[in-house]
Amino acid sequence: MTTSQSLLPISTPRPPPPPAALAGSGATMLIRSERDHMAASAPASTRILISQSSSSLDLEDDRRIESVPFLSRTSSFTGSNDAALGSSNAFFKKQRRRRVSSDSSLSSSSGGSRSSSFRQDVGRAASETYLVTRLAVKLLGYLGGILLLLFQASPEKYCLWLDLYLPKNNDGPKPVVAFITGGAWIIGYKAWGSLLGQQLSERGVIVACIDYRNFPQATIGDMVRDASQGISFMCNNAAEYGGDPNRIYLMGQSAGAHIAACALVEQAIKEAGKGQSVSWSVSQIKAYFGLSGGYNLLSLVDYFHSRGLYRSLFLSIMEGQESLGKYSPELVVQDPNVRNAVPLLPPIILFHGTGDYSIPCDSSKKFVDVLNDLGGKAESIMYEGKTHTDLFLQDPMRGGTDEMLEELISRIDYGNPEAFAEAANAPRRKRLVPEFMLKLAGKVSPF
């Protein structure tokens, strides 16, 4: 468990709970919050295992993997790590001593033969070339092993986790935001939502940052199922962590906004049909907040290609050209066969920056227009000049008043004067990064 003082909420591993704490066949495990034992000065972050497949690694293996400590950047370059570096480092030092000795003998001797000096130079070059080649081969071996693990990872062998950000004030049920982070469908990770989780938890809102598998371990269908499973967990267990089951909100950012919208529309279609069992209901979601998302893949595939997310890779992620329409919420809701699902959708509010060059803001505007034309409840909120990452990263790091966050809080606490007053009285966040660094990051960021 970590507090809000840490940017990345990485929880301390704990032994697995007794068998009685496991639900059903052992497919679900909960690691309960320890907030009762924390200092009362900061909100908490708790890691929760949503699901574990029956053929996955056992819990002992999972705990062992989580417990491996990381070497710090500084300690990895000190002399105390010579033993850890192994024979390669020793070989390098040996060559260095040999070079110093050779250089000294050359400088002190007079009349040394030119052929002897040439042989020594060749020998040094050969030994150093050997060292570099050896290290390169070893590095390629490590990378090859990592890539092999990625591509051989089976859909049946995975665990789903989420991070919970809990307000320090637990004097009553709190609103809950189930958040799906972005990452171009390739580098998404629940910890990317740590800033949002800390901001909202300080304003009396529980935040669940839901993880999902990335490509190449999974494709879009798997990602949507993973997200849906995390949403289901929060809908069915929010009260256990101090959440209000009647105030659950779904939110996604960038690729996560697309994945969350797909999960929401898919769930509405299931409920509109007959005889389909569901583990959660769209009626449990009070509103959906989409941040800088894309909702029509057919109109974005060429744009992504021009931005570096090449067509061949994107189509692999999206399960082929024929699946682009299936995973485009804007197009799915227009299908005459599923239009009866649109009225089931909760209010949809889409945030977007007009300076977004990763996913143009028109993507949110068009989805809102389509939903309203079909009888849905949707609106878009544009932020002039804001880029793809401004609303989610740079603005929260600036501290002070965050315009998008204030809008979000007002929607969550609407109709609840006590909660709104608590949020309004929350201390303003301090600046985390100097302004010149934020501007520099904005210039070099590929997003």
Image (cartoon, helix red, strand yellow):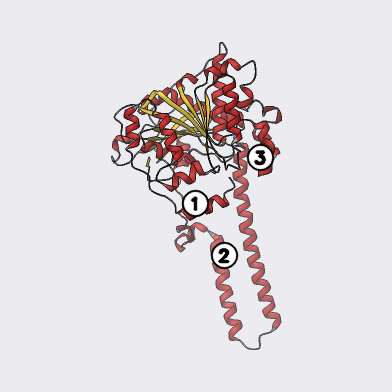
Which mark's residue is nearer the viewer, 3 or 1? Answer: 1
Numbered label attached to residue 438: 1
Q: Residue at x 63, y 56 (%)?
A: 136
Which amino acid type is marked by label 2?
A: Phe
Q: Nearer the viewer, mark 3 or mark 2?
A: 3
Which residue is at the front of the view, 180 or 98? 180
Question: Does residue 53 appear in this view?
Answer: no
Q: Position of residue 27 (x, y in %)?
A: 48, 25
Eye-nearest disc, 2 or 1: 1
Residue that lies at the very extreme toward the front in this rendered image: 384
Q: Which residue is the extreme one toward the top?
A: 274
Identify the residue at image location x=29%, y=37%: 37
Q: Is disc 1 placed on a helix, strand or loop?
A: helix
Q: Amino acid at mark 1?
A: Leu
Q: CA distance from mark 2 to mark 1?
A: 43 Å
Q: Which mark is residue 112?
A: none
The residue that label 3 is drawn on is 304
Proximity of marks 2 and 1: CB atoms separated by less than 8 Å: no
Disc 2 crowd rating (10 Å Cα; few below 14, some 14-19, many 20+) is some
**Above or below, comparing residue 310 to residue 105 in the picture:** above
- Label 3 to label 1, Cα distance in Å? 25 Å
| Quadrant (top left, top right, bottom left, bottom right) of the C terminus | top right
Q: Earlier in the sequence, mark 2 or mark 1?
A: 2
Which of the marked residues, 3 or 1, is nearer the chain's N terminus?
3
The picture places residue 294, in percent across and down from the top left corner, at 60, 34
Circle 1: is it few (<14), some (14-19), or many (20+) Cα within 10 Å?
some
